Image (cartoon, rainbow, N blue to C red):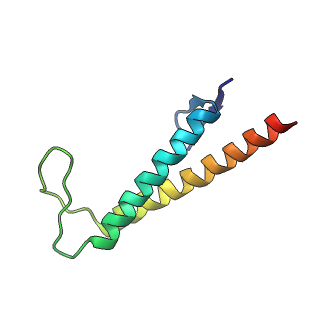
Amino acid sequence: MKKRYSFDSGSGFEADLTDLRRLLAENRQYLANYEEVFSSLEDDDYVARGNGFCDRKYSDDFIEGQMEKYAQRIALLEKWIAEWALETSR
């Protein structure tokens, strides 16, 4: 059975426990990627945009914002997974 979830006030999604666990793993990887980029950036480093070009440097603020976003999503996913476990154990 899938339930409706939302990370923000925008669009939501339906997920079951397997979906939530997959999303948790993905979001942990995204956070780890941003943490790695942030820890290795020098003042003159540029980050690829995914299309092969390195024409824009991402600011520390942008990367920190992304890290915060994924940390918040991880916390929500962990909460939802714990709630799911409680509901099914009854």
| Residue 79 placement, left or right of 40 | right
Q: Residue at x 58, y 41 (%)?
A: 21
Residue 41 drawn above or below residue 65 = below
| Residue 74 placement, left or right of 63 | right
Farthest residue in the top direction? Answer: 1
Q: Position of residue 83 (x, y in %)?
A: 75, 43
Q: Quadrant of the N terminus?
A: top right
Residue situated in front as seen by the camera: 51 or 62: 51
Q: Position of residue 28 (x, y in %)?
A: 48, 53
Q: Residue at x 50, y 47 (%)?
A: 25
Farthest residue in the right direction? Answer: 90
> Residue 41 lies in what quarter of the image?
bottom left
Q: Position of residue 46 (x, y in %)?
A: 17, 64
Q: Is residue 71 visible?
A: yes
Q: Residue at x 21, y 46 (%)?
A: 50
Farthest residue in the bottom direction? Answer: 43
Q: Position of residue 64 (x, y in %)?
A: 40, 65
Q: Is residue 9 visible?
A: no
| Residue 71 placement, left or right of 17 | left
| Residue 80 placement, left or right of 42 | right
Q: Residue at x 52, y 39 (%)?
A: 22
Q: How many marks?
A: 0
Q: Quadrant of the C terminus?
A: top right
Residue situated in front as seen by the camera: 20 or 4: 20
